[in-house]
Image: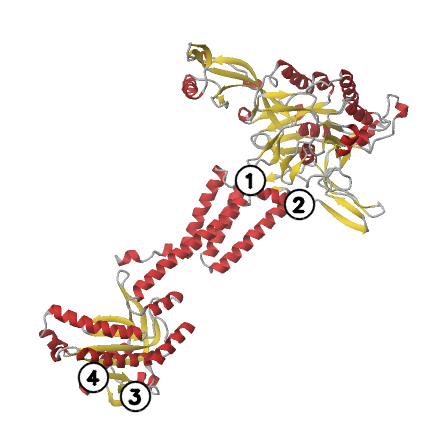
Amino acid sequence: MAKSRRRAKILETKYFGLIIGLLVVVLFLAIGHYTSLLRGLELRITDLQFTLKNQVTRTNVQVGVSVVQRNPKISSDILIVGLDPTSLEKFGRFPWPRYREADFLNGFTRIKDQSQRERAIFLDIFFVEPDSNAYDDALLVDAIKNNGRVFLETVLDDHPTLTNTSPEYVAREEVLAHKDGEISHITGDWQDLRAFLGVEPPLIPYGEAAAGYGHANYVQDQDAVYRRQILVAKWSQPIRAIPLSELTPETRIDVKAFHRLAWMDKRGGFHNIPYPLTAASIARLTAEMKAKAPLKVVKTDQAGKVTEGYYVVLEFQDHFIPSITLSLALDYFHKSLSDVEVHLGKDILIKNPQMFDTTTHAWVPYRKLIAAAVYDKSGKLVKPAVTEPVSEIRIPINAQGAMLINFMGPPSSASPFGYQTFPVRSFYGYAAGNMPGPDPNTWPPTRAVANKIILVGAFAPGLSDEKPTPYGLMNGVEIHANSLNTIITDDFLLHVPSWEEDVILAALVLLVAFMVSRLSTIWAFAITLVLLVVGFAVVTVEFELSSLVVNYATPAVAILFTFLTIVVYRVMTDERDKQRIRDMFGKYVNPAVVDQILENPPELGGVDKELTVFFSDIRGFTSLSESMMPQELVNHLNVYLSAMTDIILEYQGTLDKYEGDAIMCFWGAPLPLADHALLACACALKQLAALKKLNEGWPPERRLSIGIGINSGVMTVGNMGSLGRMNYTIMGDAVNLGARLEGTNKQYATNVIISEFTYGLVKDKVIARELDNIRVKGKNKPVLIYELIDCLEDPAALLANARDRRRAG
């Protein structure tokens, strides 16, 4: 029983803390891989890392004038033209007559030096409905056709409507696909891509005139913040409805042409059907659809109850539509959709990208800008730009074809005097004034937009479709700019492989577990805090310099959880240890001493200390026991022992044991006492006085006489015994001498005998009479003994001083 209360070594905090660390590692690996509990926190930390990025460095050269060195990771070939407040003020409420957009495009088309043309123009404007003036539509379509570099957007809808699934809208999309193509080289689980069932493309004349197209859809994370763009989206066109009863293993679909089978549940969700079909899979499908799918109603009775119906399986034709930013990037790299290889869950591969050299007016192999050119104040080149060749572009995407956008900075201001991450110009500035006519002789030499991708979109409050991003609300066209910049600068945010994050998690948690289980709580907390701060700094620097996204939230929470768990375990085990100490020492010492022991636990096991031992015994106990009934003797003895024990504890002694009528106790352990000898002597005198009072209340035949022996010296004190049964006691020659002195009282007719060793410690504080120089049994050297008569120091003051020393020590 006693053995079961002894804590196993492995349960000690310094060992069990590592086990706790291992359990925390397993727990948080499971949380990270199989749940999204910490996903929201990780997204917020990523947003914070975005806000800490350095966008620009300004150098003031004079009052009101500063030189701006722009981040080299921001492409100089991206220009935003905003439908801004100035344009609205000049042109009126939007939408404007479409000749405004036509004038804008003609302004870029009609320049004399065609080698200085823009690379592409993206109109982030819907042309789903015709203009009220058909002539303006004709002007704009003609301007788009003449420009030859205009890209238009199509919008994909999750939910089908009569409009976005109408034959007219489908025909519009087919015009775009037929003219500019679709993504066809795709591997991975394309069946499980998010399916868009509706489409809103531009009018057919616009689609035929455009140089390219792409969808403008973004995907929001679980916290409704937009951080990703779907570069490859799936538009699913239902081409056949098959009654479930007609489905057989012989049913054929063209999987190579991206056909698939699916069924819809009662909530409107679609479920793919594994192909090829088997009898077993059809049986499982039938059972599932009967439980979850709605019936196609054929006939009902007068009460509206379905009397005839069937379940429907749909065959879809999937089309893979590029995002508008991917289409613009491919055009920038001199590539087409047929050159793209999509590996879902991995990357989009663009081989041998090229770039247009505005100096030689030729396409050359793409080179990535590493460091921008440096110019002095006069504009003289100090240090040329540093570039490196790139043989292929690999755009990292997830299983849903989405890329994490590497946002370059906070939202840009429409004002030229405000902060701009990307340059923003007013639409009005390019579409007003004396616009160039059809005569080339009247055209300006250039518009200073050589090889630039011009993104035209809403940039005014109330007009723009602002979306929440890591930098707050941002206009949709600027989100396109950030997404496009991520691709054409080959500056992708790369997630550290999950196995590396697992190793980091395990290493940090085990390190914290090791420290917390061995260091003090204060030091462990300080080191843990430093580790968290340094860890955040490291991942933030990696995010900025290397575009690496390291999962910080999971390790950080795991570290805190490890710290708290081990601290709680330490508190719990400390409480158990304290209770064990209370159980152990509460029997031997008074409660105040126990409290002191809990604050400074003693070393357990045998240790040598200078102590004072105290033995007492009743004279004539055998005769007394023969004259009393056993129960009477026990009661009588208990009264005596209780009184004597209370005095021992009062004088801060440690009770060792009772041996029948004998008492053994000592001073100086488990807590050290400077006056251990004096306290033992004072205790002996107090016991004699207390016994005298007890005897006065007892009949003569039951009165007691005791003898006390006290000795001081070096003794071994500690828990002694076996693992199953131990006792806190003392051993040694000095102990044996004390026992001998107690018995010597009979020979000298005394009550208290102290040794010369005790007398040497208290001679100035007690009154004692030298008795003899005796040779006790087991000792060759004689010992000088004294009879203790009185104590010179006031007992109350003695106890008060002892308590003060104990608190101070």
Q: Residue at x 12, y 76 (%)?
A: 624
Q: Label for residue 53?
A: 2
Above/below status of 311 relative to 691: above
Please name the amino acid that badge 4 sits on: Asn
Above/below status of 601 relative to 400: below
Mark 3, secondary structure of its residue: strand
Is 301 on the left-hand or right-hand side of 370?
A: left
Mark 2, secondary structure of its residue: loop
**Residue 251 shows in this picture:** no
Q: Label for residue 497?
A: 1
Callout 3: few (<14), some (14-19), or many (20+) C-alpha neighbours within 10 Å? some
Answer yes or no: do the residues labelled 4 and 3 have beta carbons within 8 Å?
no
Q: Label for residue 745?
A: 4
- The image shows residue 752 at horizontal and vertical percentages of 24, 83
**Mark 2 vs mark 1, CA separation in Å:** 23 Å
Q: Residue at x 11, y 77 (%)?
A: 623
Between residues 397 and 206, which one lies in front from this camera angle?
206
Q: Earlier in the sequence, mark 2 or mark 1?
A: 2
Of badges 4 and 3, the one in the foreground is: 3
**Mark 4 vs mark 3, CA separation in Å:** 17 Å
Q: Quadrant of residue 434?
A: top right
**Residue picked out by circle 3:** 767
Between residues 28 and 163, which one lies in front from this camera angle?
163
